[in-house]
Each structure stands twice: as C-alpha cells, then as structure tokens.
C-alpha cells in the first residue's frame, strides 16, 4: 500500500462496536484516516453513521476498498476469533492489526502525531504484520540510544506511566531522585512527557511492548496495566485514595498477570478492596498488599499549606464518564453537569466555578467522539468558555491549583473527592441524583459510599447541592477538623509514604517477607 493510494481515498475498517471502537474511530477521524465500515457479528444497524457487516459478508470489492482492518475488541478470545473470521474471508495477516485494548490507542495516537503520513503508509503495507512492528520501526532508534546509556553495573527499575492524561505520573515520580542513586531508572510511556522529573532515561513505548522488555529488573507503576514481562516483580501504587468503583473485574485480571505483584495500598479501604478482589477472583500468583500510603496526598498537603492566595471558587470534579464500566449511569453525574454548573453560578454570585472533567474524558472528547455524552460535554465546555465566572481546568496531570483556589468541592463517585478533603480539610458535596439505586447496586460493596458523610454531605438534586454547599461553607472550620481527623484514621503513613517505600524496598528486591505486609500465595 503506497502513500499516494492512501491519500486518494483508501480506507480502513474497524472490527468491534464497543466503547473501544468509538475511541478508535474518533482517533482515526482526527488524523484523516477514513473508516469505511465496521465489522460485528451481532449488530445489524449502522454504527457512528457507518455500515456494519458480519465478516462473512465482506467479499470482493468490499475487501479491495480498504487497506486493513483494525480489531478493537478487548477480550483476547474474541480478538482471535475475529481475526480468524477475517482471514477466512481472504484478508492476509498484514491487513489485520489487533489492538490489545483501549490503552493501545495511546501509542497509535503518539505515532500519528509524530508522522501521520508515514504511519498511514505503513498500515496495510506488506512490510508490517502488527502494530508492535510499526512501533519498533518508528521508535526503535530512540529505544536503542536510551538503552545504551544505562550503567550495566546497576539493576534497572522501570517506571510505567500508562493511562491517559500523564499516566498518573505524580503518584510515583517523587521516587525518582532517590531510586536513581542506586538503580538505572527508566521511565516508559505511550504519550509525550514534558517534565524533567520523569528521569533522563525515557522510552516512548506501548504497554504491550513494555511487557516484552527483558532488561527490566523491577517494574513500578501507578496503574495496573501490564507493562513488564510476567516474571519481573511489579509494584503497583494505587492511583486512587479509597476503594474503587470502576472496573473491578478488569483490575483483578491485571492484578493476576505478573508472577509476583506488590500492591501499594493508599488507605485501609483500598487495602481491603485489594484483598476482596484477590479472594473473589481466586487469583493464584504471588501477591503482597503493602499498607503504604498515598504519595500524591503528601505532596498535596504541603502545596495547599504553602498557598497564600484567595479561596474564591467552588470546584466541580466528576468521575470518569466516557468509558464502559458497570453502573456508570449511577456513578457518574455528567449527564446533569450543565444544569449543575448553571445552578452553582446562580447560587454563588460572588464565587467562580471551576470545572475539572476527568482527564481521560477530556482527551477522548477532544477526539470528537460521536455519542450523546459528547453532546453533554460540548454544552458543559460552552458554559466554561462563555460565562465570566466559569473556569475550565484542563491540566491533565495536576489538579493542585484548583484544590488551592477552591473552598468546597462538588463530586459524585470520583476518588478525587476524598483526595480533596484529605488534602485541604475542606468539605465535599456528593451529587448523587440516583442515590437509592446507587446504594442498592454499589453501596453494599464500597467503603467510599459508606464514608461520604465523614467528609461532607450527599445531595440528590442540583438545588440541594447549592443548599448543602452553603450550609457546609458556613461552618468550614468545623469541617476542616472533621476531614483531617478522619484522614489520619484511614490513610497509611501520612506524610511519610515515599520514605516508607524507599526504607523497605529491600524486602521487594530480595523477596523477603515484611512483618507488616499481607502475603498471599507465597507458600
């Protein structure tokens, strides 16, 4: 497939019609890579304005009209089945590209941003049989240069920054100067990093390719994505401060991937959530739950205390909305966001309203997704751009300025609610329009739901949000004492989490048992 043919209308197809495919189609459209149709065995109606075909109906001129098929299906078994059906119809191996899961889109976007024309030419050519081969072709020179700079006498610690919006890098980057005294510290990511704190040794690399790198001796990440070989010990720092509503099954599967997995728990509810996931899914690998703490919180408290400016705002920070996970319609408040923000602006005429969507949502929205929730985001962002007291916080890696400036947060089931209260000592109003259903379907499993009243109040309507916010702000000093007192009961090693990890890293390096850590399947 030559570049000129791609420019004159050659298109691709996408196999799958889930959220993964929605994100892939948006990415392709942003970079002028035309999607001609979708492939799905169960959907019969059009999808995102494009026709949908079963694999057996893709023949002749339809096959010739596209350069390749990108498989956007997360389940490995279904990926294989989809590829086999396409091969049966006459597609050669180099015209079928399987993307591991939604995070694989990050490296695809990075490559498109670097050299879209060359990448379009590579996709569907006879020279490449996989996205990993394309990745190595475009990035391999930089990989080899970075690897040659490592000290061969030191062990290699890889920091994996995977997850849209910076890969939660501030949850582990404080460790870099300390680890660098003893180890080669290599940072790895699938999106551009612009800060020196990510270390001087950096590899732009997908998580799936990172999982094949034999040079790694220890892997550290702030997410549970698979980003190191199976035999390499992995430490996953929790990027949430409490237990987690989103995708428990997804987390359990990835917790069970490495042969030895250390889980650095931020709080007691997080510790118990890990323990429950492991038991419920009967994971068999060697696991260790560390009562560690929350590095980001320690830094937040220091930054909040040093701030001398005004607290003139109310911060609205909803949970992830543009992803598929169980009970999303109960957990997310985004469908009510425009009404809520207008209500806050009207009820508090002397305050600004800061809107901070989830960084992954903003990244997906900017790809111009075509769905109903994207319309809500458009309306919400229009308010931010048109109202003089409404401010959009679109910083993908740091929320601290919004924390400093605000006197109260409005959230839903986002873990940022507890992070905010524990960082600032200020109150939170939990906006829960479907509270009864939330309690029935999620509340019985999560301490997050039970403990909301320890740091704020729960509102079921936009009007009630404003009323409770006024009430909480009138007794702010009282709330500060309540939130900080509760924080010290549930957070591990407050103010000392980085030191705790560094002082005890020998137990990980030498696979020794720490008397205070919970070991599972180590016999």
Image: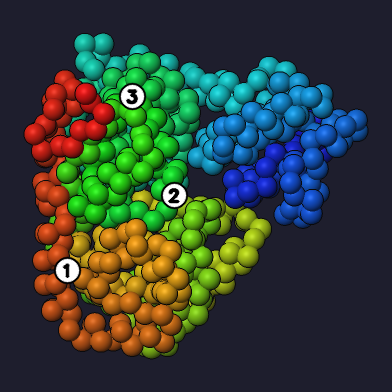
Which residue appears at 8% of the width and 34% of the height?
A: 515
Instruction: Measuring from the top left, give residue 206's x and y in whole percent.
Output: 48, 31
Residue 240 seen in this snapshot:
yes
Picture quarter containing residue 269? bottom left
Instruction: Measuring from the top left, give residue 358's x and y in whole percent.
Output: 43, 58
The residue that label 1 is drawn on is 483
Other-residue count near label 1 (Cα within 10 Å), few / some / many at <14 / 14–19 / ≥20: many
Q: Where 453 sits versus 155, above or below?
A: below
Q: Nearer the viewer, residue 260 or 9?
A: 260
Other-residue count near label 3 (Cα within 10 Å), few / some / many at <14 / 14–19 / ≥20: some
The residue that label 2 is drawn on is 247
Residues at marks 3 and 2, CA–CA distance in whole angstroms = 22 Å
Q: Nearer the viewer, residue 369 or 223?
A: 223
Instruction: Measuring from the top left, give residue 49's x and y in whole percent.
Output: 77, 55
Which residue appears at 20% of the width and 66% of the height?
A: 424
Picture quarter containing residue 221? top left
Of labels 3 and 2, earlier in sequence is: 2
Other-residue count near label 2 (Cα within 10 Å), few / some / many at <14 / 14–19 / ≥20: some
Give the side of residue 255 with respect to residue 336, left or right.
Answer: left
Q: Where 422 sits versus 136, above or below?
A: below
Q: Where 160 sits versus 46, above or below?
A: above
| Figure quadrant of the C terminus | top left
Which residue appears at 15% of the width and 37% of the height?
A: 517
């Amino acid at each position: 497939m030559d570049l000129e043919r791609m420019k004159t209308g050659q298109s691709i197809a996408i196999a799958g019609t889930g959220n993964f495919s929605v994100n892939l189609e948006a990415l392709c459209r942003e970079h002028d890579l035309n999607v001609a149709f979708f492939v799905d065995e169960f959907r019969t109606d059009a999808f995102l304005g494009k026709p949908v075909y079963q694999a057996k109906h893709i023949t002749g001129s339809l096959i010739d009209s596209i350069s390749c098929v990108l498989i956007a299906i997360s389940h490995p078994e279904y990926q294989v089945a989809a590829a086999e059906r396409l091969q049966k119809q006459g597609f050669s191996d180099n015209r079928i590209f399987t993307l591991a899961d939604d995070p694989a889109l990050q490296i695809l976007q990075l490559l498109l941003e670097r050299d879209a024309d060359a990448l379009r030419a590579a996709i569907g050519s006879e020279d490449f049989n996989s996205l990993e081969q394309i990745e190595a072709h475009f990035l391999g020179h930089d990989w080899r240069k970075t690897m040659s700079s490592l000290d061969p006498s030191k062990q290699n610690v890889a920091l994996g920054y995977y997850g849209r919006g910076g890969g939660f890098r501030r949850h582990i980057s404080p460790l870099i100067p300390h680890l660098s005294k003893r180890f080669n510290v290599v940072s790895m990511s699938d999106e551009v990093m612009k800060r020196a704190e990510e270390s001087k040794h950096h590899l732009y690399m997908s998580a799936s390719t990172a999982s094949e790198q034999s040079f790694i001796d220890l892997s550290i990440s702030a997410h549970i994505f698979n980003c190191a070989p199976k035999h390499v010990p992995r430490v996953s720092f929790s990027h949430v401060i409490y237990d987690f509503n989103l995708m428990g099954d997804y987390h359990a599967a990835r917790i069970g991937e490495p042969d030895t997995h250390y889980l650095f728990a931020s709080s007691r509810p997080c510790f118990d959530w890990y323990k429950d996931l492991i038991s419920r899914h009967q994971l068999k690998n060697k696991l260790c739950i560390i009562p560690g703490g929350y590095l980001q919180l320690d830094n937040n408290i220091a930054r909040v205390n040093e701030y001398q400016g005004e607290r003139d705002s109310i911060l609205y920070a909803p949970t992830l909305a543009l992803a598929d996970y169980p009970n999303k319609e109960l957990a997310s408040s985004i469908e009510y966001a425009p009404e809520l923000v207008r209500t806050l602006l009207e009820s508090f005429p002397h305050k600004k309203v800061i809107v901070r969507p989830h960084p992954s949502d903003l990244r997906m929205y900017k790809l111009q997704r075509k769905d109903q929730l994207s319309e809500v985001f458009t309306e919400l962002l229009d308010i931010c751009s048109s109202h003089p007291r409404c401010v959009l916080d679109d910083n993908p890696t740091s929320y601290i300025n919004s924390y400093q400036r605000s006197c109260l947060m409005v959230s839903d089931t986002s873990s940022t609610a507890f992070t905010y209260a524990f960082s600032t000592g200020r109150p939170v109003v939990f906006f829960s329009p479907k509270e009864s259903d939330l309690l029935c379907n999620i509340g019985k499993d999560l301490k997050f739901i039970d403990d909301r009243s320890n740091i704020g109040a729960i509102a079921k309507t936009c009007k009630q949000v404003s009323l409770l916010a006024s009430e909480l702000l009138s007794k702010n000093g009282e709330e500060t004492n309540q939130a900080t007192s509760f924080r010290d009961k549930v957070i591990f090693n407050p103010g000392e989490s980085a030191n705790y990890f560094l002082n005890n890293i020998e137990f990980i390096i030498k696979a020794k048992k720490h008397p205070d850590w919970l070991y599972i399947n180590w016999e």
